[in-house]
Amino acid sequence: MKSLIATIILCLTLLTACKSEDRVIWSPDGKRAAVLASDGLRVSDDTGTISAPLLVDVQICRWLPDSIHALVVSSKTTTSWEETKNLYSAGERLKILHIAKSIWKAGSATKLTSLDRALVTDALIYLRYKYGLKALQTRLADKRTNDYSITVEILKILDLANKSPQSGVVLWRTTKNVDDVRVSPSGNLAAVSVRDGMTNKIILTSKIIVIPLKVGQPKIAVESLADFPDWSADGKSLFYISYPKVDEKVPLSQLYESKHPWVATLNRREIADANGMILPKFAPTKELAEVLAADSSRVRCLPDGSVVFHAKQCSFPSLKKTDPQVSLFKLLPDGQSLEPILASKGLPSDKMDAFEPNQDGTKISVPGEHGEITVLDMASGTVTTLEKGGDGDLKFIPQWRTNEELCYPARNRENVANGHHADVVLQSLSEPSRRINLSKNWPSTSIEFLNDDEKPADTLKTKATSTKSKRKIMSGAYHRIQTPAGK
């Protein structure tokens, strides 16, 4: 249906700048699940038997194809310039030194509004390294400069078959915000989405970096504003949505008005050879479809070579003003035909960007902001509701264990005496009566994320508010600046 590309405007979402909402991630063989519990990374089997915490401060976990090893992103805070100086590019170091010079000259880090706020803390740490803490406190008249810190995110491989894994193999460290990681089908490469720039609370740069897991050096695959890619079924290419550079002079509110949408593109870029190894030089980017950005994006490649993504649809010309309709769309394997998935109109629209296809691409799960869990059968168009929405929020994005088994958060309506309002369940789609409560006997310290009353600092931020996207962008942009309480 090539004509749809010319007659339908696809309004994709603006970068949401938030951490992954995956809490329960099943291994490819379906035997175990990595659980990002409230007290650290744990591993559960398909009956709910769960390990002790293996590693704390883990934000992202992705299994490798062997179902034994996993790629994890953990974090640590530091106040040491010696520890972070080699994590910057040459251009970033020059910018930090320039900002540090401006701060020292002005005697303030708050009066220089033109500074790149994402690097102010880095500059303060450099000044403390250069002049010493006492001199810096005197110069800035701020006794709390010793409390500033930078978050370093660490990408490493862990052996999750070992109940007491060692420290793991560290592949990469960065002071940037890691939003997502996608492992290639061969297990040789990882596509890492990072954010590394902000001015006046607007994200200006979000890159996709390809990191070899065996041999080779990291390489930037996408330098323009882009996020949340996926690997093609053959593991050779990345599919992703890219956005134009944001003009910092454009009012933030204007970015969310339907009258001023962004033009974005769905792209494909060849990254690896037939063996899944990184190419010496990436192929040129191929633009596949033009879209209008509106709030967040997700791309998923299916085994048959088609690509599914979340967007909004507007038909023009129109006799009356109508709001764009949220929907799922499929780019067919030929790369020339684009069609809407019509049955997706019956799915929750407020969290459709968290859709997830099963392993063979025959079903797609779509959650809602308030805990709705639905499944779309791609062949029949039937929508099955597994969980109705309620007063609480969505605890984590549903994940498929097999083609017919979905793991998701189900409301604990019968008894909340155990301290949580939802359970992690494994539901069979082919046998609706077969449902396993995996978290029934999990330690209370591990399941705080299932509680509706969890503090905002610890919970996944999926509350529905009119300022959702603005809050995510601003909180994400200031993620690396750790300041003392009360400042």
Image (tube, rainbow, N blue to C red):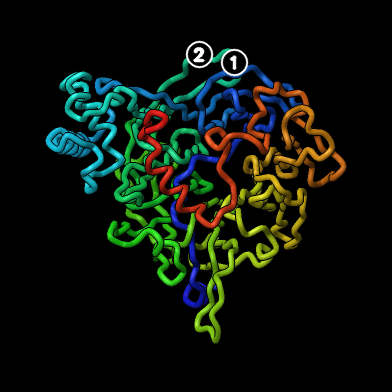
Where residue 162 is drawn, which disc sits there? 1
Q: Nearer the viewer, residue 170 or 476?
A: 476
At x 42% / y 43%, what residue is drawn? 476
User: Where the N terminus falls, by quadrant?
Assistant: bottom right
Q: Is residue 350 visible?
A: yes
Q: Is residue 166 left or right of residue 225?
A: right
On the image, the x and y values in percent for residue 385 come to 77, 53
Question: Which quarter of the image is occupied by the C terminus?
Answer: top left
State the residue at coordinates (49%, 65%): 11
> Disc 2 designates what residue?
166
- The three-letter code of the residue at mark 1 reads Asn
As displayed, is residue 141 above or below residue 363?
A: above
Q: Is residue 286 above or below residue 455?
A: below
Q: Marks 1 and 2: CB-CB under 8 Å?
A: yes
| Residue 325: image location, x then y, percent | 58, 68
**In x, y percent, where is residue 16?**
47, 50
